[in-house]
Image: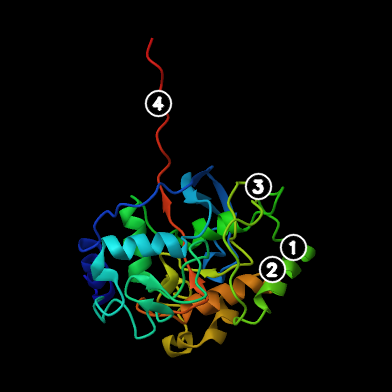
Amino acid sequence: MGTTAWIAACACCIALPCAAQTAAYVDIPAGTLASVLARDAQQQQQAIAAFAMRATPVTVGELQRFVVAQPQWQRGRVATVFADADYLSGWRDPVTPGDGLRADQPATGLSWFAAQAFCEGEGGSLPSWPEWEYVAAADETRVDARADPAWRARILAWYSRPATQALPAVGGPPNTYGVRDLHGLVWEWVDDFNALLVNPDSRSADDPDKLQFCGAGAIDLQQRENYAVLMRVALLSSLDASNSTRSLGFRCVRPQAPVLKEKY
């Protein structure tokens, strides 16, 4: 087992279910995703199995309940291997959000490990990159709006906003699946964030040192006009699992609940 996998396994071991209010999950139907990552060029259409996704990002209030119930994830108590020095740095103390942080705002400033532990407490995990992009490709009426220049421009307009602006509450307009705030609020962790620029065929892999830089995303993307995807790849690929930033939040996914058949 590699070092990263071992650390992730340890994080899972200490993540116990937390007593939290029931979150709203939306069932996402199975489908296909036309990937824009060059590594997926031969796949053309990537099959996505049905799953359920949180309708909104995890909020400050939900994260507060989590760290109260799971003190090993509190600022100052979390193991340094699982979180950097910026972890929840905007909080007043280990269990109290700082001034200006409202309970209905998206939770940010936490590491991949902490986000994954929260999701495991809800019986799920962070979404994979294909799952997140599959849902995020939808607008209010279409399951895939990525070919629409106006839609792409709207997303890029958000990316160009200063990061210093106060975050609004979660609960923006839903897309066609009923999922909210995938764009226009915060960036979001995905489960496989550190594998987006990895070429699966090592015989054709480029110099691995080049993949340490955000600009490397440009060499691994089809449809260059879809610049918003490139920005997400570049940001996520520049991170380590212990990193924390105030512009990065998360949401969870889990299997769809089975449909109970009536007995006659």
Tag 1 residue: 151
**Mark 1: which secondary structure?**
helix
Tag 2 residue: 155
Q: Considering the image in quadrants, where does the N terminus appear?
A: bottom left
Task: Out of 62 and 102, give the one closest to the viewer.
Answer: 102
Residue 214, image x, y percentages: 53, 85
Please state which amino acid type lies under the numbered disc 2: Ile
Tag 4 residue: 260
Task: Say few, some or many: other residues with alpha carbon within 10 Å of mark 3 (under 14 / 14 to 19 / 20 or more).
Answer: some
Q: Residue at coordinates 28% horizontally, 70% vertically from top-left?
A: 73
Q: Residue at coordinates 65% horizontally, 75% vertically from top-left?
A: 159
Q: Considering the image in quadrants, where does the C terminus appear?
A: top left
- Tag shown at residue 181: none
Mark before the other along the chain sequence, 2 or 4: 2
Q: Residue at coordinates 24% horizontally, 57% vertically from top-left?
A: 16
**Distance between mark 2 and mark 4 Cα atoms:** 39 Å
Examine the rendering and report whether any part of residue 6 can be seen. yes
**Mark 3: which secondary structure?**
loop
Please state which amino acid type lies under the numbered disc 3: Thr
| Residue contact at pointers 2 and 1, CB within 8 angstroms | yes
Examine the rendering and report whether any part of residue 221 can be seen. no
**Distance between mark 2 and mark 1 Cα atoms:** 7 Å
